[in-house]
Image (cartoon, grey):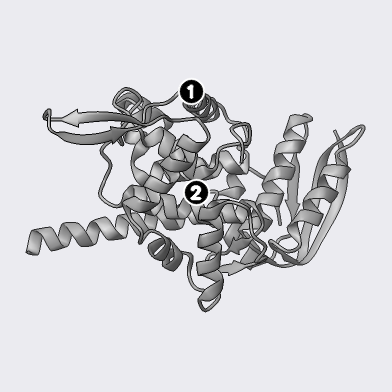
Amino acid sequence: MTAHTRLTLAEELVLIALDDERGSLISLPQFSLEFGLAAALVMELTLLGRVDTDVEKLFVISADKTGNALLDDALAQIIAEPQDQPTGVWLRRLSQPGPVLCDQVIAGLVGRGVLHPVEKRLLWVFKTRVYPPTSGLEEAEVKSRLMTLLNNDEIPDTHDALLVGLLRATGIFERLLSGSELTRLSPRINQIANLEEISRELSHTISELQAVMASAFMFG
Amino acid sequence: MTIAIYKLAGRLDGASSPAHEKALQELLVGDINSIDIDLSELDYVSSAGLRVLLVAAKAAKAKGGKVTLLSPKPATVEVLKISGFDKIIPIKA
């Protein structure tokens, strides 16, 4: 893969989830980025014609490798399990590597020259690594594409519709847009995100998990 | 507006969608800028199948035309409504 090929949905999601100046991930609702990345892998596999979904299930169309290690690993996991399980099952299962999944996507972006690692010291003692953008062009392009799409009534292309679904479900729009912008653009965001079954399932899965966590917190 | 008619039957899914997507794109040549897609014999549509309809609608709109979905079965109507396609692509019973 070269820096000239289009970024994957997982890469675009992480790029937008990184704070430009600090080079670290913005604060998001717990687990939402992990589930978002799992969904991004499934979405990319659908775009590449490897899997397909309907309102009841996810199913394999082709076992051919994609050439992307993360996608091929996700596809191998799906192929190895009983077929025709609900999409939500796969979002939960593929999210299980947790932060490791995000680290792998960041490593891919570093490999493509989109991000670069910088060592920092926290409290003058602890070493930490952050990933500011190398040029910032890729992130600016993604954000510009998104804002153009949200501010017109054009029919979205599939990749962008899926990305809108990822940003809605993970809560990134709440961080990306001002309160008034979010209120104004919410109907359009929902219209675009709801076009895709995986996006609807992702929002449902994250909401369900957050409700369970809130309930566990309240009732101990 | 010059309209072509295209009929879908059986299953519109990840296996069949690439061929239909190509065929629909090829219809939008010359004066033709709109397509009426007959869904009366379509039994099943997956997410990949829905995308074929959306891609065709986007291409037609870019030429100043539109895609209209004709006579979908109730199960197809349900899928189109769940995803909000009925707000983007006109459906005629």
The residue located at (78%, 34%) in the rendering is: B65
Image vertical order of residue A61 relative to residue B65, above or below: below
Q: Which mark is residue A140?
A: 1
Q: Could you tell whether B84 is left or right of B64 in the image?
A: left
Residue A68 locus on image (x, y percent): 58, 51
Q: Is residue A62 visible?
A: yes
Image vertical order of residue B83 relative to residue A115, above or below: below
Q: Provide the secondary structure element on which disc 2 rests.
A: loop
Q: Return the residue nearer the eye: B71 or A134.
A: A134
- Callout 1 amino acid: Ala
The residue located at (67%, 57%) in the rendering is: A49
Q: Which residue is mark 2?
A: A194
Splitting the image into 4 quarters, where does residue A45 fall?
Answer: bottom right
Q: Provide the secondary structure element on which disc 1 rests.
A: helix
Q: Mark 2 or 1, which is nearer the eye?
A: 1
CA gap, disc 2 and disc 1: 25 Å
Residue A151 locus on image (x, y percent): 51, 25
